[in-house]
Image (tube, rainbow, N blue to C red):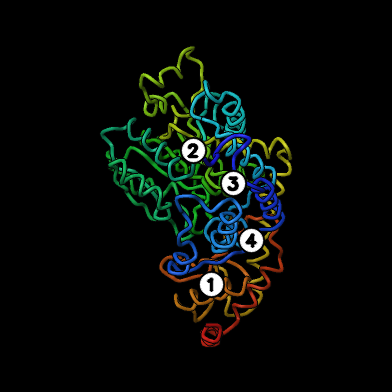
Amino acid sequence: MAYLHGPHAEIGDLADEVSGFIRRRLHGAPLGRTATAADLDAALANSITSGGLGAAKAWRLMTDVVVANTVGIDSERFLAFIPVSPSAAAAWADAVVGAASFPAESWLEAAGAVAAENQVLRLLADFAGMPAAAGGCFMSGGSIGNLSALAVARDQQPDRRMVAVADSAHASVHNTLHLLGLTAFVVATDDDGRLSARALRDALRGRSDVGTVVASAGSTNAGLIDDLDGIADVAAETGSWFHVDAAYGGAALFLAEFRDRLRGIGRADSFIVDPHKWLFAPAGSCALLYRNPALASKVHTQHGPYIDVFRKSGDEWNPSDFGYQLTRRASGLALWFSLVVHGIDAMQEAIGKGLELARYAAAAISNADPRLSVVMAPELSVVLFRREGWGSADWSAWARRLLADGIAFVAPTTWRGEPVGRLVFMHPLTPTSVIDEIVATLVIEPPDLASHLESDT
């Protein structure tokens, strides 16, 4: 009989191996690589058997195949999409959460975990300027956070099923509207890429079918903050629910100098922030806050003979009452622990490093070659830039070359239909030398780059 649990669990030296892996990973994550499906199918063939391979062989498969063929999103050289760079304290706390499997959907089961998470929610609400009654829960990510918030918005305006969104809104917002049976009313952003109160007001003039307005505090593609305060005015004028997707840029609430740019988020009926983005928590976390959480509870509270026991005294705070998750990981504990260990000042310094790196990159690109230019000065930590003469194929080849050479993982994008380069800086330990390496590759002519790729293959 194989022992799965308890002191006799047959795992050999796995505890030491995993602990060592975590320590090494936190010391410096490798950039990693990707692989073909055929290669991975072959490497993992016959790994699941009736009798098991044993801990030693299984761990080798994990490290030599699974980990080795996965891009290190926590690497200081991962500059694509929105990186994840968990602090050491957060990563170790998350390991505790995983080992303990806290059933964090209810106060009855996880009072300590929920109370700790609520401290973080209160801190975010205070930074945003939300009222004392504001509250919410942690979810598994921004997509389900947006879904949960907009489900509440829908039920406040059941006859007004159009939702005003910017043309820069995250894909999860559009997917959410589809799932909820709502319709997007897309409003064009201004020339600077931001949704303005003027544009929104003009677009909504004469309409009575829009019941929700969604704005961004840090658009994913360009890192831009919409006119939150002005949009809050328009939402109030039209009697619309105001939701802010601050999954990425909401971390800037920790910086006093950025709160003025984020003014208006405190007037939102709901907003989200993803700690796994710029607050250095492990992947799988979203803070969801409501101005009036009682409205959310009416929408999301689940009932059944086996779960009504959650609500006996009437004053319990059950996270499952505020979002579309019953079984829920205590995904806010890692951020709470990191803040308790290091304090707010350290978090501010780490967030600020991303801003410094973005400004350095923008200057380095602008000064390197006449063919290079930034699309706009970075507002947060995203840098969009042009390379004269390059099209989509050139950008793709450039990105592949950077990964193959172990320089960086990047993902070009488009800006108003134009193929451009994109870099995102969040990891506080990304050295400026990485930026210098990347900029040096941008002066290679496309034919030379293509030849370089061909010779490598």
Is residue 9 visible in this depiction of the protein?
yes
Q: Nearer the viewer, residue 365 or 428?
A: 428
- The residue most toward the front is 1
Residue labelled with disc 2:
139
Q: Marks 4 and 2: in contact by CB < 8 Å?
A: no
Residue labelled with disc 3:
282
Disc on res. 399: 1
Q: Residue at x 54, y 64 (%)?
A: 69
Residue labelled with disc 4:
358
Q: Nearer the viewer, residue 58 or 307?
A: 58
Q: Nearer the viewer, residue 327 or 272?
A: 327
Q: Earlier in the sequence, mark 2 or mark 4?
A: 2
Q: CA distance from mark 3 to mark 1?
A: 25 Å
Q: Quadrant of residue 251?
A: top right
Front: mark 1 or 4:
1
Q: Earlier in the sequence, mark 1 or mark 4?
A: 4
SS at circle 4: helix
Instruction: Inspect the image, locate mark 4, and give the three-letter code of the amino acid beneath it.
Output: Ala
SS at circle 2: strand
Q: Earlier in the sequence, mark 3 or mark 2?
A: 2
- Disc 2 residue crowd, few under 14, some 14–19, many 20+, Cα 10 Å: many
Q: CA distance from mark 2 to mark 1?
A: 32 Å
